[in-house]
Structure formats: C-alpha cells, structure tokens
Image (cartoon, rainbow, N blue to C red):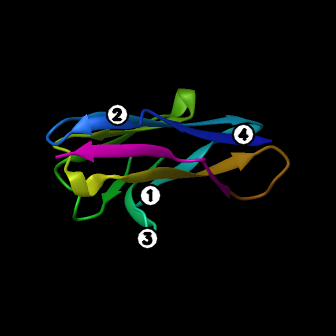
C-alpha cells in the first residue's frame, strides 16, 4: 500500500508564508515526480508546481517568484514553500506523487487528501 499525505495548511494573513509538505510512504521504492495542485470552491483543480527526483522544477505563471518546490529523496517528501500569499491563493492544496512501488512495473500516481490554505485580506 502507498500513502500520500499533505500537511502544513492553515490560516494566514495576506503577505504571509506557509510551507506545505507531501510525504509518500508504504511499499514504495522512490518518487519519480510530484505535482502540487490546488482547487478553490467552484473552480477546477489547477497544477501549480512540479518537481522530479532529479530536482527539475516547473511552476504555473501565477505562483512564479512566490512559491518554491523542493524534494528530499531520502525522506520521500516534497515541500512547497509559499511566500507573499494572496487571498486568491485560498484553496485546498493537493499533491500527486508518481512513485515506483515493489512488484509494479513503471510508476503510479497517488493523490493525497488535501490540505486547506486560507489567506485572509
């Protein structure tokens, strides 16, 4: 079994910072890549940042310069540092981890349950 858990969400004032974590555990051999998404009420789920095990990153334009994604392969954990938060960043944040697992050829994506981020004005 594979478990993916997000943590670190909360309530913060505009201009503040939060650090989210995405931890994968279970029968995994390692992470190939992790994508962070967010979904505000009534809106579609948007990808905001991604990282590979080798450290290659990609960001949505609306978070560039404010969010930083990083990976700790030894802990199968990906972090998302969010600075200069705005009220429009309010959403549930999800990670999708593409992992290699024992007994499975290739990679499989697993979603976490999400963590709420609320930015007050």
Q: Does the magenta stretch include residue 120?
A: yes
- What number of labels is visible? 4
Q: Is residue 10 above or below residue 43?
A: above
Q: Give the range drawn in magenta.
A: 108-121
Residue 67, position in %: x, y? 26, 46
Residue at image position (35%, 53%) is 57
Can residue 98 be seen from the camera position used here?
yes
Local SS, label 1:
strand
**Residue picked out by circle 3:** 42
Q: Does the magenta stretch include residue 118?
A: yes
Determine whether, in the image, residue 111 is placed left or right of residue 115: right
Determine whether, in the image, residue 118 is placed left or right of residue 34: left
Instruction: Kindly report which numbered mark, 2 or 3, lies closer to the viewer in this rendering.
Output: 3
**Residue picked out by circle 2:** 19
Can residue 54 be seen from the camera position used here?
no
Residue at image position (74%, 42%) is 2
Dominant secondary structure, magenta: strand
Determine whether, in the image, residue 82 is placed left or right of residue 79: left
**Residue picked out by circle 1:** 37
Instruction: Kindly report which numbered mark, 2 or 4, lies closer to the viewer in this rendering.
Output: 2
Badge 2 local density, few (<14 within 10 Å), some, or many (20+)?
some
Q: In which quarter of the image is residue 106?
A: bottom right
Mark 2–mark 3 Cα distance, whole angstroms, equals: 25 Å
Instruction: Kindly report which numbered mark, 3 or 4, lies closer to the viewer in this rendering.
Output: 3
Residue 31, position in %: x, y? 59, 44
**Which circle's residue, 2 or 4, is located before the other in the chain?**
2
Nearer to us in this view, 99 or 121: 121
């Amino acid at each position: 079994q594979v478990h993916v858990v997000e943590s670190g969400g909360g309530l913060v004032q505009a201009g503040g910072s939060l650090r989210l974590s995405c931890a994968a555990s279970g029968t995994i051999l390692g992470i190939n890549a992790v994508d962070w998404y967010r979904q505000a009420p009534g809106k579609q789920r948007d990808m905001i940042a991604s990282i590979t095990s080798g450290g290659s990153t990609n960001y949505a334009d609306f978070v560039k310069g404010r969010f930083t994604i990083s990976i700790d392969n030894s802990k199968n954990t990906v972090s998302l540092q969010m600075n200069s938060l705005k009220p429009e960043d309010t959403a549930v944040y999800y990670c999708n981890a593409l992992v290699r697992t024992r007994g499975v050829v290739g990679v499989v994506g697993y979603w976490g349950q999400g963590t709420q981020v609320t930015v007050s004005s």
